[in-house]
Amino acid sequence: MAALTRTASVSELVERAREGNARAVARLISLVEDASPKLREVAAELAPHTGRATIVGLTGSPGVGKSTSTSALVRAFRKQGKRVGVLAIDPSSPFSGGALLGDRIRMQDHATDPGVFIRSMSSRGHLGGLAWATPQALRVLDGTGFDVVLIETVGVGQAEVEIASTADTTLVLLAPGMGDGIQAAKAGILEIADAFVVNKADRDGADNVVRDLRNMLGLGGRHSEAGAWRPSIVKTIAEKEEGVEDVVEAIENHRAWMIDKGVLTERRIARASGEILAISMTTLRERMGDLSGRASLRKLSEQVAAGETDPYLASDTIVAELGA
Ligand code: GDP
């Protein structure tokens, strides 16, 4: 395999990445992080190869064991011979490019495995933010032949709930001894689970968390609707890699159910719709930026200031110009 040159073209990068060249994958992800104009070409090259990866989201409060579980899952999928990509999404951190995950000891175990690609991403400074960047990074990993992509959300905020619209299967992690069992879980987070992972099962109280979850699932909400998926509940000791095979099985079961019911296709259509909207918003925002110097805006502003027209009518003209 020839060395990857600094000036490699997009199609060369895609070809190399698909052959398993980690640096080519990293370069493509960097194009996403930099919101490079080349992404249009990247997306076109990748499109025929996308739609194959199993996309798994992991979420839960800080300290619950997401990073440990992600690492254990990577190992389990590697045992099956699968290529695994990991995206750690931190909406609050200014760091990106591996600073976060790279510091985590367990992830170092995979650092030299060419079948594993790990990247931390932050939304700061990105036009369009996380909603734009995560699906594009996912597109790169999916289109370059990663069989499984694990998306771990770190930190707080909307990202935890947004992950559910990005992943095929969302794992919500809980642990005993963290607040008052499931009552301590953030609003909305229990609703998005396709499987619950009760980690730290070596600690007292894990069975109580499982019991609370079972009760909750029987009490109504999205999970009790007719024909809805009943999320599995799996106990793990991620630190000892115990129960991880059961998590893999829960992911596989959910996937089989989604394929059977046509839900997987629907989720992917919904994700594509989100991508189209995020890209459109970015494009429109860029055009808005261009507008500020335009003569037409100046003229309309003068008319509004003089009371000759109103800002709503003026905005109709501007919006029509944006679409042109
Ligand atoms: P994250 O913040 O959700 O990513 O959590 P981490 O994976 O960083 O784990 C937080 C802490 O919990 C670390 O000190 C881990 O070693 C510990 N931990 C992870 N899994 C287990 C487990 O199954 N049992 C116990 N007792 N500790 C665990």
Image: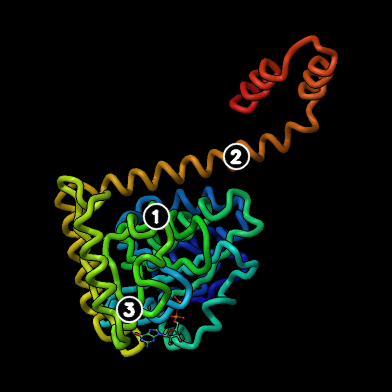
Give the quadrant of the C terminus.
top right
178, 86: nearer the viewer: 178
Residue bearing mark 2: 283
Mark seen at residue 199: 3
Q: Which secondary structure, mark 1?
A: loop
In the picture shown, does residue 138 fall above or below 203? Answer: above
Q: Which secondary structure, mark 3?
A: loop
Q: Residue at x 35, y 78 (%)?
A: 176
Residue bearing mark 1: 188
64, 194: nearer the viewer: 64
Callout 1 amino acid: Gly
Of the numbered discs 2 and 3, the one sitting upstream in the chain is 3
Asked if the residue at tag 1 contacts the one at tag 3, i.e. Cβ–Cβ closer than 8 Å, the answer is no
The answer for how far apart the CA atoms under marks 2 and 1 are is: 31 Å
Q: Which secondary structure, mark 2?
A: helix
Callout 2 amino acid: Thr
The answer for how far apart the CA atoms under marks 2 and 3 are is: 42 Å
